[in-house]
Image: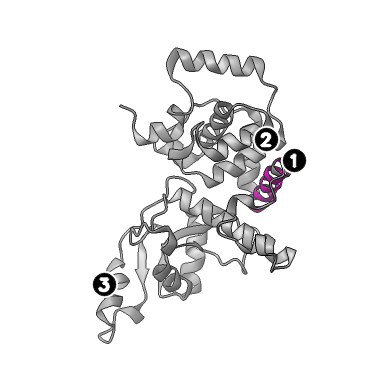
């Protein structure tokens, strides 16, 4: 029986064994080489999907495939190849299909060297394919930014809101829509919390390594320095929440997590240097 990791990394997207090898040879023989633009557009979709949705039936994958005139299986395989380049995925023993191209590897290196610039280019390439089919920019996050339809914001504000919504999608996908401290799994009560604030680091606003999936309560506590997550991924609670005058709800929902380890995401693990920055800013270190 296939494990969850196997399913996530494409066994539902690409057949196994002899059939998979035959299909891969057929795709390679009949399809034109992937361009940088196509690869980046696929990377944009990869950011938004959890492992369990990296298969050829996923609507986002089917849609992008039609835009690029490729098969859904080929696009799903491309996303699986990105997963095979993720060191956290490799460390877990899930190496993906292991057929990443030189272009895939080059894009992945570039992404990790300058995350926001590459993520922005990936989003732009994705939008250009959509616009060629009459799909407006930001349509994939329309449910989170309804103002796009209402036209009540400036272009700069719209772009900021769209980027924030895309960051949220990547964080919730990585953490399987579950608070990494409390385990809350109600998406309407979850926040993609920046470790280093949006206003303090313009180079890592879209970087999921700079994010934690938190409940609205834990996000507020994190944002105000009542809790932090140390570089070893353990929660530290401020002494302000440990005194005799602290009410029972605060003790149970916040202080009780002191010293416990967060649940790490399946990919894009929080960067220890970012965690240290937050801990030092609020004098936990």
| Of the pair 110 and 148, the residue shown nearer to us | 148
Residue mark closest to the camera, 3 vs 2: 2
Q: Disc 1 versus disc 2: distance between alpha carbons?
A: 8 Å
Query: Horizontally, is 64 left or right of 93 in the view?
Result: right
What secondary structure is marked by label 2?
Answer: helix
Q: Position of residue 41 (x, y in %)?
A: 65, 40
Q: Position of residue 40 (x, y in %)?
A: 66, 40
The count of marks equals 3
- Residue 157 drawn above or below residue 29: below
What secondary structure is marked by label 1?
Answer: loop
Query: Horizontally, is 56 left or right of 93 in the view?
Result: right
Q: Quadrant of the N terminus?
A: top left
Q: Which mark is residue 67?
A: 2
Q: Position of residue 90 (x, y in %)?
A: 45, 36
Residue mark closest to the camera, 3 vs 1: 1
Quarter-of-image position of residue 155: bottom right
Q: Disc 3 versus disc 1: distance between alpha carbons?
A: 52 Å
């Amino acid at each position: 029986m296939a494990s969850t990791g196997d399913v996530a990394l494409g066994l539902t997207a690409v057949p196994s064994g002899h059939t998979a090898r035959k299909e891969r040879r057929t795709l390679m023989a009949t399809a034109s080489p992937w361009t940088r633009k196509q690869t980046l557009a696929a990377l944009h979709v990869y950011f938004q999907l959890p492992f369990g949705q990296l298969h050829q039936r996923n609507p986002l994958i089917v849609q992008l495939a039609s835009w690029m005139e490729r098969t859904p299986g080929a696009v799903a395989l491309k996303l699986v190849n990105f997963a095979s380049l993720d060191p956290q995925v490799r460390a877990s023993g899930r190496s993906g299909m292991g057929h990443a191209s030189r272009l895939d590897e080059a894009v992945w290196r570039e992404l990790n060297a300058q995350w926001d610039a590459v993520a922005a280019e990936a989003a732009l390439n994705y939008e250009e394919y959509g616009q060629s089919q009459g799909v407006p920019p930001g349509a994939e996050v329309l449910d989170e930014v309804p103002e796009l339809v209402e036209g009540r914001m400036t272009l700069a504000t719209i772009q900021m809101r769209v980027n924030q919504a895309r960051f949220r999608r990547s964080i919730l996908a990585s953490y399987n829509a579950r608070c990494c401290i409390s385990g809350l799994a109600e998406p309407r009560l979850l926040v993609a919390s920046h470790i280093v604030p949006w206003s303090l680091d313009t180079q890592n606003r879209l970087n999921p390594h700079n994010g934690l999936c938190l409940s609205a309560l834990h996000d507020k506590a994190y944002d105000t320095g009542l809790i932090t997550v140390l570089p070893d991924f353990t929660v530290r609670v401020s002494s302000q929440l440990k005194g005799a005058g602290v009410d029972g709800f605060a003790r149970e929902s916040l202080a009780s997590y002191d010293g416990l380890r967060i649940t790490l995401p399946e990919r894009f693990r929080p960067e220890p240097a970012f965690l240290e920055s937050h801990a030092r800013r609020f004098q936990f270190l």
